[in-house]
Amino acid sequence: MNNFLLKRLGQTLLSIWGVITVVFIILQLSGDPTLLMVPEGATNEDIDSLRQQLGFDRPMIVQYGDYLIKMTRLDMGTSFIQNIPVIDIIAPRIFYTLYLAFSALLVAFGIGLPVGIYIGVFRNTPLSRILMGLVLIGQSMPTFWSGILLIMLFAVKWGFMPSSGAEDALSIVLPAITLGALSMATIARITRTSIIEELGKEYVRASKARGLSHSAVIRLHVMRNASIPLITIGALELSNLLAGAVIVETVFAWPGLGLLAVQSIEARDFPVVQVLVLLGSIVYIGLNLLADILYSVVDPRIKLHGGKR
Amino acid sequence: MLKKLLLTIYILAAALVGGGITAATASSDMLVVDLVNEPSTLDPHRQWNPDSYFVYRNIYDNLVTRDTAGKIVPQIATSWKAIDDTNIEFKIRTDVKFHDGSPLTAQDVVFSIKRITNPDFASPQLGQFNSIIDAVATAPDTIVITTGKPYPPLLAQLVKLSIVSKAYVEKVGDEELNLSPMGSGPYKFVAWQKGIKVELEANADYWRGQPPFAEVQFRAVKDAATRIADLRTGKADLIVSLNSDNAAELSSASDLSILSAPTERVAYLMMNTQFGPLTDVRVRQAVAYALDRQLIIDALLGGYSQIIDALLTPAHFGYVEGIKAYPYDPEKARELLAEAGYPDGVTVELVTAPVFDQRIVQAIQQQLSKVGINVEISMGDMSTFLERRRADPERFGDMVFGRWSCACQDADGVLYAMFNSDSVWSKYANPELDAHLEAGRSAMDPAVRLQHYKLALDIIADQVPSIALYQAAAIYGARKGLVWTPTANESLFLMDMSWQ
C-alpha cells in the first residue's frame, strides 16, 4: 500500500510539473499581455517600459526558472491586472466553485441514480426508454443555452428564482441544475450497465435460493456491488463538472473559479491563469487518486498495490 | 451518521452563502448596476477600463471634468491659465474633504500627478500622462503643471486624473488603496465582494451636493442575456454594454428604457499603404466606394450608430465638417480597380479580432466581393490582433477592421497615432501629413490646431490610408424612471443620474 501511494505521489508531482511547464509555454506563445494593458495609440517606449516593469523583457528561460522557484516556495505571485496577490484573488472563489460542483453532482446523482436503477431492473419497458431519452436530452443541451432557458423561465417568466449572482440562498438552484444535467445520463447509464451485470451473477441466484425476495437481493447485494464503478464515475464526473463550471458560472454570474478563469484569460493575467490551471490539474489528479483509494474501502478485495483492478 | 454529517455541512454551506444577504430590491434609495466584469482594480492610477473606472470615478474627484455636452469644465480646479507654452497654473478648491474628513490640498493633487507619472509605478495609463515632467504646489490653492514640450491635449488628459489622498496612500500602501479606496467623490467605498459586487454609499458631505442614491451596487454579470434577465426581474436597475440586438429585445418591455449615446469610438478599416495591393491609392479608393455604410448601420446596428466620414467624431477636438466623403458607388469601384491593374479582381487579407462585431466584418467581405475584391478574414484573439495591428507592413495584413478610441476626445490621440509615419500603429507615410500632425500637437492656439487638423483630414480623405465606417454607440438598458443621459466619453457618473 505504501509503495503504491509513493509511486502515485511521484507520478502526481511529475504530472504537476508537466502541467506547469505546458501552461507556461502556451501562455507565453499566446501573446503579449502588455499590449492589452496599454491604451490604444501607446508608443513603443510606453509598451517597453511596462514590459520591463513586469519582467517580460527577460529571456523566456529566465522567466520560467523564476516561476518554477516561486512555485516550489508556494509563492503564487501577484496579478498584474489586479495588483494584488493571486492567492487573495483565488481563495474567496474556491468555495463557490466547490459548492456549485457538489450541488451539481447531487442533482446528477439525485436524478441519474434512480433512473439508472429503474432502467436496469426494468429493462426494455416503455417507461425506461422514455426516462433514458429524457436524461439524454438533459445531457445533450449545451449549458450556455439551457442556462439562459432556465433563467428565462424560472426568473423572468415565473419570477421565483434569482436571475444571477450568488446573493440569495436560492441562487445555487438554477446553476446546479444546469450543470448537473451534464452528468445525469452518464450516471444513469453506468448504473444501468452495472446493475444488469450484477443481476446476471451467480450470487443473485444463490441469494434467491436462500429465500430472499427479488427486491431484497437488489437492495442488499446488487446495489452495493454495482456502486463500485459509480465511485470512479462520480470522481471523474466531478472533475468534468469543475470544467463545465466555466460556462455555467459565466451564464449565471456565479463568482467561482470558472468565471475568474474566463476573465483572466481574456486579460492575459498570466499569474492568475497559471495558478488556476495548476489548481484544476491538481484536483483532477487528486480525484483519480481518491477514487483508487475508495475502491478498497468499498470492496476490501481490491488491494492497493497498483495495476490490478 | 455520515449522511447526516454531510447534510449538515451542506445546509451550513447554503446558509453561509445565502444568509443575511437578501435580494436586492429596487427602491429609490438604491441603484444596482450590472457591469460586464468586476473592476480589475479600484486604484484609479492603475487600469483604465470601463468596468474599473465606472466604479472608481464615483469614489474620486478629478482635477477637471467634462460636462454632459463634452466641454472641459472645472471640478477640483476652479480655474486655470497658461503661464507659457509648457507651464499651466491651476487654482483649486479649498473646501473639498476626503471621506476620512481630511481636506484635499494642492499637495494631494501634486502627489496624484507624480504617482501616475512615476515610471516605477508602471501605470498602464502612463502614456497618457508622461508629457508631464513636473508638478509643484506654489500656494495652498495653486499648482503648476509643467510639460516637457507644448502639449495642447493636456487638459483633455487631465479629465481622467483622479485625485487620491497623499496621506492615505502613504499610510496604507498601494495594495490597500486598491482594495479599499478612499477619495473625495460623491460615493464612499463600503465593500468589495470579490467576483460578485462592489458596494458604495452616498457621501453625505459631498461638496457638489447630495448624491442621488443612498446606496449603489456594481455587480459583475458577464453574459449580456443574463444582464437583460437581471433588468427584467428587477435585480438590476441599469445594465451596460448592450448591442443593437439586445436593445431590440428590450424595446418591447414597457417598464424598461434603452439609453444610448454616440461615443468617441470609431469603427475603421485601416489599409496597408506600404505593402501589398493596397499600396495603390486607386485600390484603396475602390474599397471606399464599394462599401455601403448606411446599409451596414441600418441592417446590422439597428440604426444606433452613425456614418462618419473622418476618424474623428463631433465629440473630438479637431473634428471639422465638410470632409470629402466616398458615396456608395460599386461601378466607380470596379473602374478604379481595373485602372489599377486588377480588372479580374484582387485578394486581400483582413485582420480582425472576435471582440469586434463579426457581422460587420462579414458584411464588409460581402460588399467588397461584389466589386471583385476577395477578402480573406484572419481572426486572432485580441492580443494577437494588437500584435499584428502594430506589426511591420509585411506582417500587418492588407486591412484591419477595428475600433479606435483614445479616451481623450482630441484629434492628437487619434490621428497622430494612426497616421504619423513613425507611429507603430500607422501604415502610412506622408511628410506633409506628418507636418500637420506635428503642428497640431504643439500649437497651443486652438484655432491654429483646427486649421492643421482640417488639412490633415483632407489628406487622409484623399489618400485613404483608412476608411471611417461609423461612430459606435454605447447602449445601456435601464428601469423606466432612471433619468440619465449617457455621454460620448462612456463615463458613468452617478451624480448625473436620478430617479424620476
Image: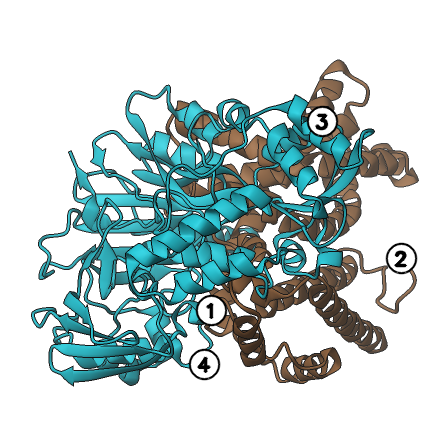
Chain colours: A brown, B cyan
Rate crowding at label 1 as few (under 14), some (14 to 19) or many (20 or more) other CA atoms within 10 Å: many
Same subunit under labels 3 and 2?
no
- Amino acid under label 4? Pro
**Mark 1 = which residue?**
B124
Residue at image position (52%, 72%) is A46
Relative to the observer, which residue lies in front, B256 or B381? B381
- Give the Cα distance between marks 4 and 1: 10 Å
State yes or no: discs 3 and 2 in contact (Cβ < 8 Å): no
Residue B394: percent from left, percent from top: 76, 57
Q: Is residue A169 placed above or below A260 in the rendered structure?
A: above
- Amino acid under label 3? Arg
Secondary structure beneath label 3: helix
Q: Nearer the viewer, mark 1 or mark 3?
A: 3
Q: Which numbered tag is attached to residue B36? A: none
Residue B193: percent from left, percent from top: 37, 59
State yes or no: discs 4 and 2 in contact (Cβ < 8 Å): no
Relative to the observer, which residue lies in front, A195 or A240? A240
Task: Quadrant for residue A45, please give it.
Answer: bottom right
* Badge 1: chain ID: B
- Amino acid under label 1? Pro
Q: Which numbered tag is attached to residue B334? A: 3
State yes or no: discs 4 and 1 in contact (Cβ < 8 Å): no
Q: Which numbered tag is attached to residue A309? A: 2
Going by the image, does A31 lie left or right of B22? Answer: right
Secondary structure beneath label 1: loop
Relative to the observer, which residue lies in front, B263 or B466? B466
- Give the Cα distance between marks 3 and 2: 72 Å
Is residue B276 visible to us here?
Answer: yes
* Badge 3: chain ID: B
- Give the Cα distance between marks 2 and 1: 56 Å
- Give the Cα distance between marks 1 and 3: 45 Å
Residue at image position (9%, 61%) is B207
